[in-house]
Image: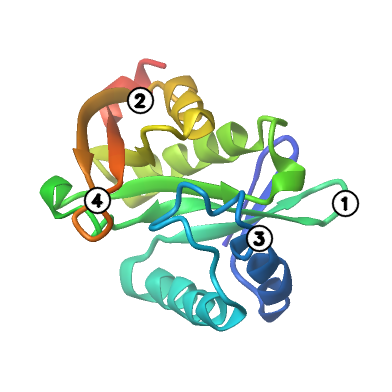
Amino acid sequence: MERLTERLRLRMWRDDDLDPLAAMDGDPEVMRYIGDGVPLAREQTAGALVRLRRRWQERGFGLFAVEVRETGEFAGWVGLTVPEFLPEVMPAVEIGWRLGRAHWGRGYATEAAREVLAFGFHEVGLAEIVSVAHVDNKASLRVMAKLGMRPERRTAVPSTGQPVQVTVITREEYAAT
């Protein structure tokens, strides 16, 4: 499965994605607001890549690898997942994204996430999609606002205690944007 936006290709994962994904996940600045804020080791990213592929098979949705169409360069990922790390919002499907630092500030997260919202509502058939970000992650909070997502609650992730903002958009709200 592949989806194209004006500047990006959202695609399934390949074995050769491990190196750029591991570099991104190993960057302390990229991982600053993710989980406990600790960069991932290559072995952790390799395990995550296996799980990313498996989730597509299990659920019919997941995270897309994102590459820049003009260059073919791996930029990061965007997609849908189940936010099991935050039991109070369950059952839910979350939209999320992570881009390498070289791709920040270009509007890629918003562009890719708009395509994933369309996929989630029109093809997966979801009635609502949430997004969760650390309260200090201003860039992700701006993307959520650009997508038309509205703040639903502030809470803390049980496993880390990190304060997060939960936003939401319904199929009807999406259709009106």
Where is mark 4, residue-wise? 161
Q: Nearer the viewer, mark 2 or mark 3?
A: 3
Q: Nearer the viewer, mark 4 or mark 3?
A: 4
Tell me if label 4 and label 3 are in contact, CB under 8 Å: no
- Measured in 3D between alpha carbons, the distance from the residue under mark 1 to the one under mark 2, in whole angstroms, is 31 Å
User: Dot 3: within a 10 Å radius of its alpha carbon, few (fewer than 14), some, or many (20 or more) residues?
Assistant: many
Identified by mark 1, the residue type is: Thr
Q: Residue at the far right: name it.
A: 71
Q: Is residue 175 left or right of residue 119?
A: left
Q: Nearer the viewer, mark 2 or mark 4?
A: 4
Q: Residue at the far top: name it.
A: 176
Identified by mark 4, the residue type is: Gly
Secondary structure beneath disc 4? loop
Find residue 106 and report its horizontal and vertical position in percent.
72, 31
Q: Nearer the viewer, residue 104 or 52?
A: 104
Where is mark 3, residue-wise? 24
Quadrant where the C terminus is found in the figure: top left
Q: Is residue 159 left or right of residue 147?
A: left
Where is mark 2, residue-wise? 149
Residue in the image at 27% along x and 44% along y? 126
- Measured in 3D between alpha carbons, the distance from the residue under mark 2 to the one under mark 3, in whole angstroms, is 26 Å
User: Dot 2: within a 10 Å radius of its alpha carbon, few (fewer than 14), some, or many (20 or more) residues?
Assistant: many
